[in-house]
């Protein structure tokens, strides 16, 4: 028919299409892999993976929260430790949307998995000598192999205490590495350190530092920032008075002093954290119904006090910062709280867990592959959160 406009196809340049796609959530990209072979290939390139993750970091897009806790009910002879995915989407403010169980760690039900990360969207979970890498966005996981030294010690039934396991990224070799400390409980009670490389899928021993991580696995006792891992450390004669760092590229340790905050370590606990991409330390009072918090940040090689929070009642300890600068706190009545330092408003988010069971992990989605396998019920089980867990 005359006058009818003809359909015209508009061809979008590949670079423009990839730029648009790099801003989408991982779930959509995984679905779009079947659109065409070129898209499927592009999504696996290091350039696209990096661009996608940087977009998320820059714009605070696709931020996810995982809450590690023990559910109120128990199974068998002890509690089952689990993770809950917390929704922070508009219109679904801080609701539990699904629970995640790890059958791999069920035999260690009295010792919850310690969690390291996030590092470019990846997490490392560990109980004793069992450890896995996990990308919760792509739902891929990888069980780490035992180290040669671990095999030898297990053969001769030597008691080993593993601690301080952390996941980091080496930008020089584009490799993800896991470092862990362990204590040989028979031969002279000596400490040793091993380092795992994802590229080689193997472990090796590295030089043991003078300072030893203190309280690792508690949630904020360590953090990864820009190629370095930082621990709150204990040293002979300098208990609880230093920060231990590891350069993931040269695999060497060093120490730096804590801020001179003017308090006593007997009265104040120390927690290390990532504060907007910089090394931060929180000092908070150990006892009393009213809590005090001092937040210090390393800026240009020296410590600067960022702000103080005084006389906050009904809270136990800090869990980490939200993307807008608000502070997550564990409440005295086992609830998850959000504190605004500017207005001093304390908000109950309606998420509950038993005492001493909280750890909050905030991660940005990524497509980083770990050469593992897809989640399956033998290792990881996801279930929708029940109504009882979603209380306002």
Image (cartoon, grey):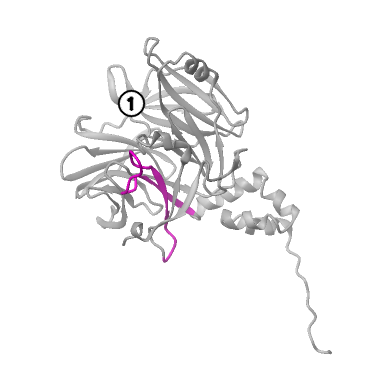
Residue at left offset 42%, top offset 40%: 278
Q: Residues within 10 Å of mark 1 (few under 14, many from 20)?
A: many
Q: Residue furthest front?
A: 76
From the viewer's perspective, is 136 left or right of 77?
A: right
Q: Between residues 144 and 254, which one lies in front from this camera angle?
A: 144
Number of disc labels: 1
Give the x, y percent position of residue 114.
41, 35
Q: Which residue is mark 1?
A: 242
Residue 236 visible in image? yes
Q: Is residue 227 visible?
A: no
The residue nearer to you, when weighing 253 against 313, is 313
As rendered, which of 149 and 122 lies closer to the eye? 149
In the rendering, at what x and y percent does residue 381 appear? 49, 47
Give the extent of the magenta segment.
Answer: 63-91
Query: Residue 220: x and y, percent?
Result: 36, 38
Specify the farthest residue to the right.
Answer: 2
In this rendered view, identify the residue nearer to me: 210 or 219.
Answer: 219
User: Is 75 in the magenta?
Assistant: yes
Residue found at the far top of this picture: 188
Q: Quadrant of residue 46?
A: top right
* Coordinates of residue 384 in the picture (x, y in percent): 45, 56
Q: Quarter holding the C terminus?
A: bottom left
User: Residue drawn 70% across and 51% down?
Assistant: 40
Q: Is residue 258 shown in magenta?
A: no
| Residue beneath the point at 37% across and 13% down | 189
Element marked by disc 1: strand
Q: Is residue 312 left or right of residue 172?
A: left
User: Does residue 359 sit above or below 247 in this rendering?
Assistant: below
Assign the N terminus to one quadrant of the image: bottom right
């Amino acid at each position: 028919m005359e006058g009818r406009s003809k359909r015209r196809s508009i061809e979008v340049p590949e670079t423009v299409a990839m730029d648009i796609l790099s801003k989408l959530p991982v779930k959509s990209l995984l679905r779009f892999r079947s659109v065409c072979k070129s898209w499927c290939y592009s999504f696996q390139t290091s350039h696209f993976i990096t661009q996608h993750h940087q977009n998320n970091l820059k714009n605070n897009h696709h931020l996810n929260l995982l809450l590690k806790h023990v559910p109120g009910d128990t199974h068998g002879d002890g509690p089952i430790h689990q993770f809950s995915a917390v929704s922070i989407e508009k219109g679904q403010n801080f609701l539990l949307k699904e629970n995640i169980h790890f059958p791999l760690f069920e035999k260690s039900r009295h010792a919850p998995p310690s969690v390291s990360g996030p590092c470019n969207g990846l997490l490392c979970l560990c109980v004793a000598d069992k450890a896995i890498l996990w990308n919760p966005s792509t739902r891929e996981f990888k069980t780490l192999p035992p180290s040669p030294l671990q095999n030898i010690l297990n053969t001769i039934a030597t008691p080993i205490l593993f601690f301080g396991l952390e996941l980091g990224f080496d930008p020089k070799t584009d490799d993800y590495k896991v470092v862990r400390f362990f204590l040989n409980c028979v031969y002279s009670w000596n400490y040793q350190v091993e380092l795992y490389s994802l590229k080689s899928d193997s472990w090796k021993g590295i030089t043991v530092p003078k300072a030893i991580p203190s309280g690792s696995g508690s949630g904020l006792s360590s953090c990864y920032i820009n190629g370095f891992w930082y621990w709150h450390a204990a040293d002979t004669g300098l208990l609880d008075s230093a920060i231990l760092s590891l350069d993931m590229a040269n695999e060497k340790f060093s120490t730096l002093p804590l801020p001179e905050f003017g308090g006593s370590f007997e009265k104040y606990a120390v927690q290390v954290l990532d504060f907007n991409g910089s090394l931060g330390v929180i000092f908070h009072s150990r006892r009393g119904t009213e809590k005090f918090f001092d937040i210090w940040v390393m800026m240009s090689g020296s410590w600067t006090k960022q702000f103080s929070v005084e006389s906050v009642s009904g809270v136990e300890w800090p869990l980490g910062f939200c993307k807008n600068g608000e502070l997550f706190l564990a409440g005295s009545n086992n609830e998850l709280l959000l504190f605004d330092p500017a207005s001093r408003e304390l908000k109950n988010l309606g998420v509950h867990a038993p005492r001493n069971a909280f750890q909050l992990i905030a991660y940005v989605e990524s497509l980083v592959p770990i050469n593992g396998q897809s989640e399956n019920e033998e290792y990881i089980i996801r279930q929708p959160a029940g109504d009882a867990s979603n209380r306002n």
